[in-house]
Image (cartoon, rainbow, N blue to C red):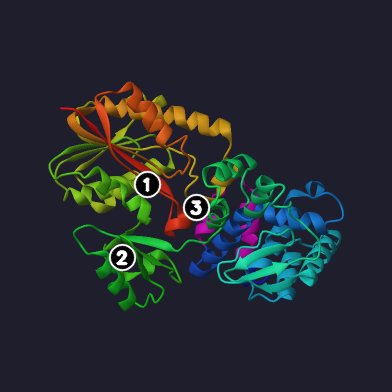
Amino acid sequence: MNDAFAPRRLALRALSERRHGRVDLDRAEFRGADGASRALLQEIVFGVMRHQFLLDAILARFVPDKLSSVQPQLREILRMGVYDLLFRERLPHAIVVNECVDLCGPQRRMRGFVNAVLRRIAGAMVPVELALGEIPLDRVSVEIAPRRAVRLPEPFLPDFTQHPVQHLSRRFTLTEWFARELLKLLPLEAVAFARATCSRQALALRPVHGRCTAAQLLERLIADGCATARLLGSVVEVAPQGSIEELGAFRDGLCVVQDATAAEVAPFLAPVPGERVLDLCAAPGGKSIHLAELMAGQGSIVACHRAGPAAARLLDNIQRGGWTCITPHDLGMNAARLPDGPFDAALVDAPCSNSGVLAKRVEARFRLEAPLIDQLAALQLDLLHKAAERVRPGGRLVYSTCSILPQENESVVRAFLATHSEFRLDAESLRYPQRTERDGGYAARLIKAE
């Protein structure tokens, strides 16, 4: 096989080796791909995962037997092929089919099967122009880009008016439980939210506090030849052609990778130079470092973590930035070794469902079920209790998630306040991606009485 096809073979390996919906693109064989190859690898893998239920619904109409009876690796090849046919429009259909056939190896029966199925789908696709802002919700159409769709001859989706939960689930690759929650939570915006979870987000760069502003960062990126840069709130969005490390502004330490919603959390805590601050869920360290920037490196930040890859990234980020004001703190087995208080302020950026960042955390969409949310809410409330015990009178406590579900956000905070009369809710913020063109997330600031 030609080296030009290597990203597709790597994508097949990554998709075939998924465990509980997760892919690991940090392994050596994936990291070794050059910038363009790695970008294509990520596009194929994450694209297939974002649209998996939709791809399967289409395939079910063109595979002679049940799709579940198709050998798993062959099923991944078909998914990759349908994804390319739909969403990588500039690729000629014949090339897509031939590349997918090549992935089958020498087995003539597999090659013939993939060739026949993909050619039938390609031949059935009819391009359709959409009105500005139109989102097709019929049974035969797929939006492939703004104002463009593809129509197939036979229905492959449930009727939206009669079965909205099932339609949203299959069209946007969401669990039926989460689709049902969306329709209750955002009855007029459920489709727009679901659509946002399938978008390919640009990379967001936050300017390092004290080194440059967002406007200055934008100017530098444009001067460096990053023509796609645009200002979005407190960050700058870019679509780099190669690796992020190739950007001069990043190499010079003027910016870090962080979404606009995540970049709001540390300022929400409002740390002051000289304070003692607790970051109870610090790994991989983005918010700890932002806190250190806002404190001008003066004071003390205790960054709690548990053993694992995220903790390794936390330690590396602290060391690479030379942040002597940040003290890593290993919580130990079962997170039982908590640091002693008191702290002037505490941040609980809690583990959550990632329901607000499904466009980025693509594997999370397969895990969104009621039992998981119940488990997370119990953990989140416990973390709030532990942080509260370590905040001094008059101190501040910020609770944040990258979820949009009230079970993990407002309900947790209200349950906490019901048993902690010494705290009051000072402010809270909830971001939805369909409204802001950025990640979703929640934050609440609580003040402890003097």
Report the span colored magenta: 7-32
Earlier in the chain: of badge 2 and badge 1, it is 2
Q: Is residue 193 above or below residue 376?
A: below
Q: Is residue 204 magenta?
A: no
Provide the secondary structure element on which disc 1 rests: helix
Q: Which residue is mark 3?
A: 26
User: For the residue marked with disc 1, what is the amino acid?
Assistant: Arg
Q: Is residue 377 above or below residue 57?
A: above
Give me the residue at 56% from left, 66% from top.
Answer: 40
Could you say which quadrant of the image residue 399 lies in?
A: top left
The answer to whether the residue labelled 3 contacts the one labelled 1, judged by CB atoms less than 8 Å apart, is: no
Q: Which residue is mark 2?
A: 251
Q: Is residue 357 above or below residue 37?
A: above
Earlier in the chain: of badge 3 and badge 1, it is 3
Earlier in the chain: of badge 2 and badge 3, it is 3
Query: For the residues marked 2 and 3, what is the alpha-carbon distance in whole angstroms?
Result: 21 Å
Could you say which quadrant of the image residue 307 lies in?
A: top left
